[in-house]
Amino acid sequence: MDAEFQIVDPKFVTTGDYVSFTVVDGPKRVPGRISRSALAVLDKGNNSEPSAIFEEHLEEIRKAAHMMRRVNPTLDVIFLASNDF
């Protein structure tokens, strides 16, 4: 995974059951979302705040988003769910 692939601008207050963020892949910016159930899987039952889970597991989230982007480069939105972890 290259250094140009980043996860930025997480938004924890959304109208859905997810945290939104932006994927920066070189010159492209793609919206991304991770479900709160995926965050719970990453948290392993610790009942942490979503922002703390996101920050603690940012590299795992980045890897999952990178894999999805490489497998499906034409996706308009990257959706990460519990089965991605």
Image (cartoon, helix red, strand yellow):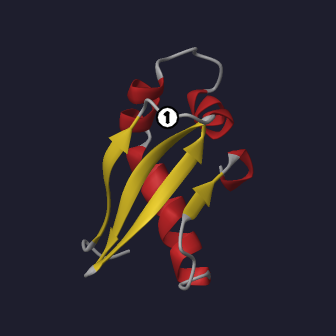
The location of residue 31, given as percent across then percent down, is 44, 61
| Viewport quadrant of the N terminus | bottom left
- Residue depicted at x 64% and y 40%: 38
Question: To which quarter of the image does residue 46 belong?
Answer: top right
The image shows residue 19, relative to residue 75, as above or below, that is: above
Outermost residue, top direction? 47
What amino acid type is highlighted by mark number 1? Thr
Q: Nearer the viewer, residue 64 or 51?
A: 51
The location of residue 20, given as percent across then percent down, is 46, 46
Q: How many marks?
A: 1
Per the image, the residue denoted by label 1 is 14
The location of residue 65, given as percent across then percent down, is 51, 63
Crowding near the residue tagged with mark 1, few <14, some 14–19, many ≥20 C-alpha atoms within 10 Å: few
- Residue depicted at x 65% and y 19%: 45
Outermost residue, right direction? 83
The image shows residue 79, relative to residue 4, as above or below, that is: above
The location of residue 68, given as percent across then percent down, is 58, 71
The image shows residue 60, relative to residue 55, as above or below, that is: below
- Residue depicted at x 39% and y 25%: 52
Outermost residue, front direction? 15
Q: Nearer the viewer, residue 81 or 2?
A: 81
- Residue depicted at x 43% and y 36%: 54
Q: Is residue 37 left or right of residue 12?
A: right
Outermost residue, bottom direction? 74
Question: To which quarter of the image does residue 5 belong?
Answer: bottom left
* Numbered disc 1: secondary structure: loop
